[in-house]
Amino acid sequence: MWRSRIFWRLFCAYSLLVTFALALLGWVLIGRIENHTLDEVRHGLELKTVFVREVAAGQNASQLQETVTRLGADTDARITLIASDGTVLADSRETPENMENHKTRIEVQEAEASGIGASTRFSGTVHEPMMYVARRIDSGTVRYVRVALPLNAVAAEIGWSRRVVWTTIGVTTLFTLIVSAIIARRLTSPLVELAHAARSIARGNYGQRVRISSSDEVGALASSFNEMSEACAAHIAQMDQDRQQLRAVFRGMVEGVLVIDADQTVQFLNDAAGQFLAIIPDNAVGRKLWLLARHRQLGEAVDRILESDAPHHCELEWSSTEPKVYLIHGTRLPGEPLRGAVLVFHDITPLRKLERIRQDFVANVSHELKTPLAAIGATVETLLDGALQDPEHNIHFLERIRENADRLHRLVQDLLTLGRIESGQELMELQPIALGEAVEACMTRQRDRAKAKELRLEQAPAAAPVIALADEEAVAEILDNLLDNAIKYTPPGGRITLRWRAESGEAVLEVADTGVGIPEKDLARIFERFYRVDKARSRELGGTGLGLSIVKHMVQALNGTIAAHSEVGQGSVFTVRLPLWRIFHNSHGGEVIHAHLNT
């Protein structure tokens, strides 16, 4: 209410009008009272001059002072008798001889001119404000009779009148302001309530109602507003329900849906389309599509869709943090003039990725099979051409055939193992596995290879035995592949360290080497099938390119994770985390004092 502009306008208008009227009335009334009081005093003085003139008539000069003194005491007025030349003949309060000539007094001059004169001024003789009235006498020694009355009492009475008038006006004004405020509030309160309800509806709070406090036009307006609000609330509720249903349908769609008008302004965008195009749907509506997604292929597709009545289909390569491929189906909206178009996006990235993986797999397998087969074929041809009869070389060629046959066998076995793991056919028998024993067994199997290459195999065991929940053969396969990989890529004189420990409810196994290391750009892809950092070196060392991929899938089958950290020239560290079965803490040679199960 206190912030209502119309309230303050009405209140200020009423207040200014009433205040001005009362102030004008007070000013006129006080002026009238003052004038009336002074006129009454002057009229009284005029009568007294007549009285003094009659009493003083016929008396000689020696009797005038005594008569004036007595009359002044009886009338509480100052009486002065003045000769025609201005000489004071008698005065009721001062000795005439001590008084100056009064010929120039205003009241005397007016009396000379018109028979009676009056003036108000401060008296230097009696030292107070006085009102003087002089009357001319046309015969005798006394020419002028002047009667004066002090104005202190008159001023006090006028001041009292002023206080009474202004106090009354002030109280009346205050009362009027209060009444004005009440009236303005009664007039503006329904309007303010209507405005507040309208703003609330504008903010989305439909169904607002206002009180009907009168039956006049304002009350009729409030009643109409309530009816309008209820109707709007019903319509909005139905529209919102329909919109929610439509939004739920579009939100549940895997496909992205984009609707634009003829000017390529976005009219609708579902969540899937927003994710595809990296656009926030709530911020996209009402903005130009080419401002939200600056993409040449998308722009060309939209232009073609808007130009033709026939549906348009195309593929769109979208560059983002992860490249995507979308299939777009677009068609114009019906109606003339052109209303816009609707575009439906299908994410075919997984299909293209599977197709690329299939192509890469076929190419890699073909290449991996072709190399040893070509070597076997060439060696067999050499033997058939006569080398079989050469005792110095036939054994060497036969060893070459066996090496490549073993390489083919390992490749086929790795492919079969990887296929079984990915299809879920590789059954894992989860049981408690002591990592220390598994590491010792792996080092025993690989020690001769490491020794032949002049590598040091070291262990960094945990303070207490660590038991993992895993499959024994899978753990052995994981360790063999990681240690084999470390031996292949660690130059002579290097060191390979196997560490294991319990950490945060997990069994952690690390294989660290001082080998050639892996560039940072290749770390993210080393677990892909047939991916090699140095293809020539890997084939030279007899690798199939499937070892790390098998390790990753086996670790995942055991509900674990694997990560790699490496620096070129500094070596690599492969970290495997498996579910922990239990942790042993031995104290003072005692037995197990704590066990923890990780389900």
Image: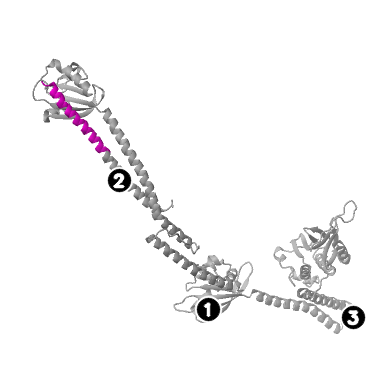
Q: Which residue is mark 1?
A: 331
Quarter of the figure with the C terminus: bottom right
Left or right side of 116 for 172: right
* Numbered range of the magenta stretch: 30-57
> Percent x, y for residue 399?
87, 76
Is 74 or 370 nearer to us in this picture? 74
**Is residue 511 visible from the viewing direction of this image?**
no
Examine the image and state in which quarter residue 522 appears: bottom right
Q: Main SS type for the magenta part?
A: helix
Residue 504 sits inside the magenta stretch: no
Q: Label 2's element?
A: helix
Q: Secondary structure at mark 3?
A: loop
Q: Which residue is mark 2?
A: 21
Picture coordinates of residue 598, whole percent (x, y)? 79, 62
Going by the numbered disc 3, the residue's amino acid type is: Asp
Query: Tag 1: residue type?
Result: Thr
